[in-house]
Image (cartoon, grey):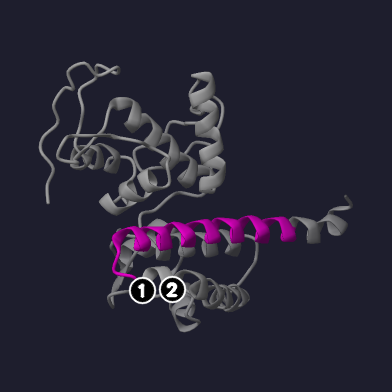
Amino acid sequence: MNEPAASAAPGSARTQPLMSIGEVLAQLRVDFPDTTLSKLRFLEAEGLVEPQRTAAGYRKYSWDDVARLRFVLTAQRDQFLPLRVIREQLAEWDATGEPPGRSRPQLVAVGPGGEVPGREAEVESPEVRLGRAELVARSGLDESTLVELERLGVVVSDPPGWYDGDALIIARAVAGLAAYGLEPRHVRGYRSAADREVGLFAQLVAPLARQSDPAARARAAETARELVALSQQLHAALVRVGLRSTLGR
């Protein structure tokens, strides 16, 4: 059900024009295309934002609320921060009146393609749909390497003949590793390790994902996101520790 259009709130302390949840979603999707209504409701349920309510119960967001949401989404996307840490930073914001975005996480300019200067990895939306030729061109892989990655199950087209943003990220990473001499067969271990993690994490999020409540499904997606972020941090730290003796540190 669509909520009414935004209107000013007479007597409101904020004295700002108020927006409906649909209008806020439209604002945020420019920079965070994966954001959904369920996600916004979930963040409210977690106490990260508290929109005003009309007498009929409709949510009304101020620009301050949108700024908080932008901070939360940026912290998740760029620093993989869990909600617990973000909640602490927002509490500091409330206590000091200083937006934590001024110090952490850093808000940086991005290029027209979404690239961040000085950062190699690019954020690609899973909603991206690429043909085979475009995947090869944008990733830097050659056709024979892509064929081998598909044979190993590392890159998968879905639906057949089309590739999403994650396939592009994988292809770019493999192309980068290939520049150092790694071959597609060396990536097979990554696929096996990822499958083991999928099985483990699926047990944790499946009970929530099976519920019909949109809030529960949003919590499942958030849990999965945090598990992936923690897994990436753990993997990177273990590799760094393992290489210390080789580097003589």
Compared with 183, 37 (above or below) is: above
Q: Pinpoint residue 10: horizontal percent, then vertical percent.
A: 17, 18
The amino acid marked with disc number 2 is Ala
Q: Residue at x 25, y 42 (%)?
A: 25
Q: Residues within 10 Å of mark 1 (few under 14, many from 20)?
A: few
Q: Residue at x 59, y 72 (%)?
A: 190
Q: Pinpoint residue 182: horizontal percent, then vertical percent.
A: 63, 68
The amino acid marked with disc number 1 is Arg
Q: Are marks 1 and 2 in contact (CB under 8 Å)?
A: yes
Q: Pinpoint residue 126: horizontal percent, then vertical percent.
A: 35, 60
Q: Is residue 70 left or right of residue 25?
A: right
Q: CA distance from mark 1 to mark 2?
A: 6 Å
Q: Residue at x 80, y 61 (%)?
A: 242
Q: Pinpoint residue 156: horizontal percent, then vertical percent.
A: 40, 75
Assess whether residue 205 is covered by the magenta stretch: no
In the image shown, does 31 or 116 lie closer to the viewer? 31
Disc 1 target residue: 210
Task: Name the secondary structure under disc 1.
Answer: loop
Query: Which mark is on residue 43?
Result: none
Compared with 204, 70 (above or below) is: above
Q: Residues within 10 Å of mark 2 (few under 14, many from 20)?
A: few
Q: Main secondary structure of the magenta part?
A: helix
Q: What residue span does the magenta drawing correspond to?
A: 210-239
- Residue 171 seen in the figure: yes
- Residue 110 seen in the figure: no
- Find the residue positioned furthest to the bottom: 151
- Find the residue positioned furthest to the front: 55
In the image shown, does 147 or 234 lie closer to the viewer? 234
Assess whether residue 224 is covered by the magenta stretch: yes
Disc 2 target residue: 206
In the image shown, does 219 or 183 lie closer to the viewer? 219
